Image: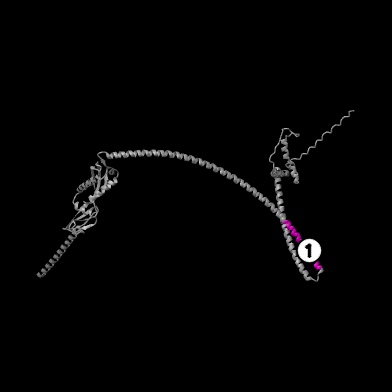
Amino acid sequence: MPYPQILLAAADAGGNTMILILVCVIALLLLTTVSLIFSRYKRCPSDKILVIYGKVGTGSDGASRSAKCIHGGAAFIWPVVQAFEFLDLTPMSIQVDLRNALSRQNIRVDVPSRFTVGISTEVGVMQNAAERLLGLKLDEIKTIAEDIIFGQMRLIIATMDIEEINTDRDKFLDAVSCNVETELKKIGLRLINVNVTDITDESGYIVALGKEAAAKAINDAKISVAEADRNGSIGSAEAERDMRVSVSKSNSEAIKGENEAKVQVAESEATRREREAEALKRATAAENIQAARAMEESYEAQKAAEQARASFEQAKMEADVIVKTEIEKRKKELEAEAEAEQIRRRAKGEADAILMKMQAEADGVRQMLTKQAEGFGEIVQSAGGSSDDAIRLMLADKMEELMKVQVQAIRDLKIDKITVWDNGAAGADGKSSTAGFLSGLMKSIPPMNELFDMAGMKLPTYLGETKDAPAPSVPDAPSAPSDPA
């Protein structure tokens, strides 16, 4: 290869190398810049406060700020001009054993308590924490907070009585929380919790108050127990009384209900029997009325039939006379005959209707008599075929009505008083005067035999026979005096 070409080739190779080196340097610078930017971008955890200090700008009043606090989020930290640190938000428990604190009553008390504090995330208070607590350890922060709490506790106890501190614990805690938290905010802390374990005094005043309260509570409890026992005894007696009254009342109401139910049953039974008797009475009366109406209608039908028959005979006679005497008046005869024929047909139709009605009534009467005969035959058959026994059965059924008729004879006699003077002597028939009076009174009732005679019937032999009246005794004639001769 010629020399000039070799030089040109070497120059081209050197130029490519320089370009490659320059690209690598630029890439390295860019990578370094990006890495630096990423390393200066800080994220704040939720349990910490990011405090950026250095040149952080000015506040709203135009003054330069000492630090910038961020809770949550992230921020870019400029190199050289800015730096950063974290404040831990972990709560701190501080045991405060306050002793010999002077109260408003000049009584020294011991108030052991425990406070829980932590760095505040409130805007403005975080700035105080950044200015006063940044760089301190937790133990150092605890010591500062403990001194503040001791001072505020003594101040609060000095303004309160022992009773308020011991009994009104909420008021005491509210005062401690308000005063202590106000002072803690000045250094960037916040009060999370206050717990007062016990309060004692050197003179035993609080113990005496406790004993007094305990004795009062015991006495109140004894009084409550005694009142409860008394109320229980009274309630038990009243409950027993109410139970006995309720049981007695329920028993009386049950007996009353049973009696009323029995009365209602008896009244219902009486009403039923009364209605049955009334219905039977109405049915009997209705049957009698219907039978009377049927007889009346039958008589009226017979009368109408006789009248129709008479009209028919009269029309027939008049037609015969007209035929024999007035031949010249043929036309009038035909008309008269036609009219007579119509009358005859109407009369015959009415007569046939009356005849059918009477036949129907006769059939009804025949059926009724047939049923009565069949019923009597069944009674005779039930009596063993003896008609006398059947009649006895029918008379026994009507005996009550017959006795009522006999008793009716003396029922309406108005006798206000009957005075009988009886000397005890018997009469001719061996009866006393009182017995004779009653016997005569009963004889005034119509005898059964006379009752049957009045009805045109003969008393059956099984009811007794009439005794023949004894013949009056004829006194013996006095014997003739003997002849003295």
Instruction: Indicate left or right for 351 with 55 as reference.
Output: right
- Please state the extent of the stretch shown in magenta in the rendering: 297-324
Q: Quadrant of the C terminus?
A: top right
- Can you give x and y, in whole percent of width and height, for residue 206 in the image? 28, 40
Q: Is residue 306 magenta?
A: yes
> How many numbered badges does the structure rendering display?
1
Q: In this rendering, would 382 be left or right of 102?
A: right
Residue 383 can be seen in this image:
no
Q: Where in the figure is residue 139, as x and y percent of width and height?
A: 20, 47
Callout 1: SS: helix
Residue at left offset 73%, top offset 61%: 350
- Quadrant of the rendered structure where residue 363 is? bottom right
Q: Magenta span: helix, strand or loop, mainly?
A: helix
Q: Amino acid at mark 1?
A: Gln
Residue located farthest toward the right when viewing the structure as drawn: 485
Q: According to the image, what is the colour scheme of the structure?
A: one colour
Q: Quadrant of residue 256?
A: top right
Badge 1: few (under 14), some or many (20 or more) residues near its Cα, within 10 Å?
A: few
Q: Position of residue 77 (x, y in %)?
A: 19, 58
Q: Quadrant of residue 82?
A: bottom left
Residue at 69% across, 53% down: 289
**Which residue has dot 1 on it?**
314
Of 162 and 406, the residue lying toward us? 162
Up/down of 464 relative to 318, above or below: above
**376 left or right of 82 in image:** right
